[in-house]
């Protein structure tokens, strides 16, 4: 198969993308120009989305047809996995931990947040997802302005970092991972259920797996997959930077090869 402009797609190469901070401004809808670019990129490589959020939120940001518009869609780090619009697999945190341990963890988190002295609190402090808990000290019901203010406050005070440290010590026996991402929250999931989880669905098919993310620092929710020996990791700073890096890495060389 040949792309419409004559370039050959690299079927052994896949580009995986984080969502917030990589393809979109955090929790915002992607610009149409970014979405158009991703479809153009599919002429050269396979494209996969790897988000920590559930499928509903990813579709809010990338469009309601996201599961069928990309070669792979991995929500909740791949615990809910789609290939070409078809479900590959679904994993469950509730089943993995059991109700008793899960309740113990949730009760502690809610008590901790209740006693936490921060400027404002809103609602939805814990979001129960299929494969993880998303914990927000301010509450996910806050406005964008309040998100921005909390992010600045957190950078100065380390609220999320301290919270995570306490949970790591208190629940060491559960073998959980705590990953700070976005502006207001952090994810809680079993070891091995970070974004590297999605690689099991692509590592046999592709010889080159590229990953693009903004939180690739240690403790960030892109760190594990960025550092994996199975991927070629790329740190980006914005959707514009993502487009520029992919153009230089995939599209420009392919077009230059055609001119030789």
Image: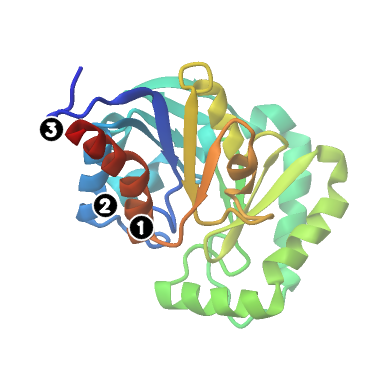
Circles 1, 2 touching at the beta carbon (< 8 Å): yes
* Disc 3 to disc 2, C-alpha distance: 19 Å
Task: Say whether residue 209 is left or right of residue 187.
Answer: left
- Numbered tag placed on residue 111 in the rendering: none
Mark 1 falls on what kind of element?
helix
The answer to the question of whether label 1 and label 3 lie on touching residues, with beta carbons closer than 8 A, is no
Specify which label sits upstream in the sequence, 3 or 2: 3
* Relative side of 179 to 70, left or right: right
What's the distance in space between the residues labelled 1 and 2, CA to CA? 7 Å
Identify the residue at horizontal 20%, vertical 32% (top origin): 258
Disc number placed over residue 34 in the picture, else none: 2
Residue position marked by numbered label 3 in the rendering: 5
* SS at mark 2 in the image: helix
| Image-based side of 138 in relation to 88, left or right | right
Work out which residue is located at the far left of the displayed protein and give it.
Answer: 4
- Earlier in the chain: of badge 1 and badge 3, it is 3
Q: Residues within 10 Å of mark 2 (few under 14, many from 20)?
A: some
Say which of marks 1 and 3 sits in front. 3
116 relative to 38, above or below = below
Instruction: Determine whether 102 is above or below 160 in the image.
Output: above
* 10 Å crowding of disc 1: few (<14), some (14-19), many (20+): many
Q: Which residue is mark 1?
A: 239
């Amino acid at each position: 198969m040949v792309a419409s402009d004559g370039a050959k797609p690299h079927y052994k190469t896949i580009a995986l993308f984080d969502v917030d901070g990589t393809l979109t401004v955090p929790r915002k809808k992607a610009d149409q120009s970014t979405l158009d670019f991703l479809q153009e990129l599919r002429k050269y490589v396979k494209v996969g989305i790897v988000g920590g959020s559930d499928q509903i939120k990813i579709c809010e940001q990338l469009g309601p047809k996201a599961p069928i518009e990309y070669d792979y869609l991995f929500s909740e780090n791949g615990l809910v996995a789609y290939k070409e619009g078809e479900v590959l697999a679904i994993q469950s945190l509730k089943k993995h931990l059991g109700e008793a341990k899960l309740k113990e963890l949730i009760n502690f988190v809610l008590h901790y947040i209740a006693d936490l002295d921060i400027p404002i609190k809103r609602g939805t402090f814990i979001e129960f997802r299929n494969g993880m808990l998303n914990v927000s000290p301010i509450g996910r019901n806050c406005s964008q302005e309040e998100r921005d203010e909390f992010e600045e406050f957190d950078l100065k005070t380390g609220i999320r970092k301290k919270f995570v440290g306490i949970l790591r010590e208190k629940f060491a026996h559960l073998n959980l991972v705590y990953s700070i991402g976005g502006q207001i929250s952090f994810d809680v999931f079993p070891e091995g259920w970070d974004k590297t989880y999605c690689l099991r669905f692509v590592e046999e098919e592709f010889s080159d797996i590229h990953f693009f993310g903004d939180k690739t620092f240690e403790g960030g929710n892109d760190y594990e997959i960025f550092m994996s020996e199975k991927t070629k990791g790329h740190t980006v700073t914005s959707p514009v930077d993502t487009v520029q890096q992919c153009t230089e890495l995939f599209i420009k060389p392919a077009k230059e090869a055609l001119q030789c």
